[in-house]
Image (tube, rainbow, N blue to C red):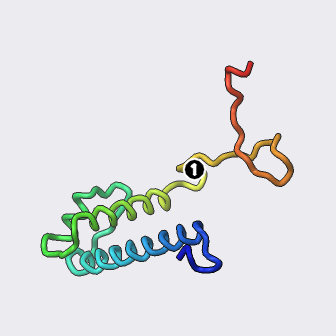
Amino acid sequence: MLGNPGSNPLEMFWDVVDELDQVLDIKIDHAEAVLKRNSPSFVCLVETTDSELRAALGSDHDIPDDDVADVFAYVRRSSLITSRPLDSPPLLPVPRPCAAAPRGRKTPCRAPSASRY
């Protein structure tokens, strides 16, 4: 906690991220168990839709709709990342270090604004 010696806001942030990650892991484990029971041959691909996942889970599961949506979003993101060819551009733009930056400092380059010229 923030009041404890040695803790700071950044540590608190990572504690919350870790806790949310653990909660998501529990949701994924539960969904995998239901899928193994109801649809053992189901494979979630990039093309898989939310409705296909819900159909594979079946109607006799006890997973809340929000949890199914969370699991689908995670699996979808993961399959998008792992199915990309190695030579494809990154999903998010990676800032380039600026040549004019002080030595050892990696700051993104910015195009000069038109108003400055």
Name the residue: 67% across, 21% down.
114
Name the residue: 26% across, 75% down.
35
Marks counted in the figure total 1
Question: 35 or 19: which is nearer to us?
Answer: 19
Name the residue: 69% across, 36% down.
110
**Which x, y percent locates residue 14?**
54, 70
User: For residue 5, what is the image quadrant?
Assistant: bottom right
Q: Which residue is mark 1?
A: 90
- Secondary structure found at label 1: loop
Q: Is residue 57 above or below residue 37?
A: above
Q: Is residue 92 above or below residue 46?
A: above
Amino acid type at circle 1 is: Pro
**Which x, y percent locates residue 44?**
34, 65
Q: Is residue 43 above or below residue 76?
A: below
Q: Is residue 92 above or below residue 44?
A: above
Residue lying farthest to the right in this orientation: 103
Question: 16 or 46: which is nearer to us?
Answer: 16
Q: Position of 72 compared to 96: left or right?
A: left
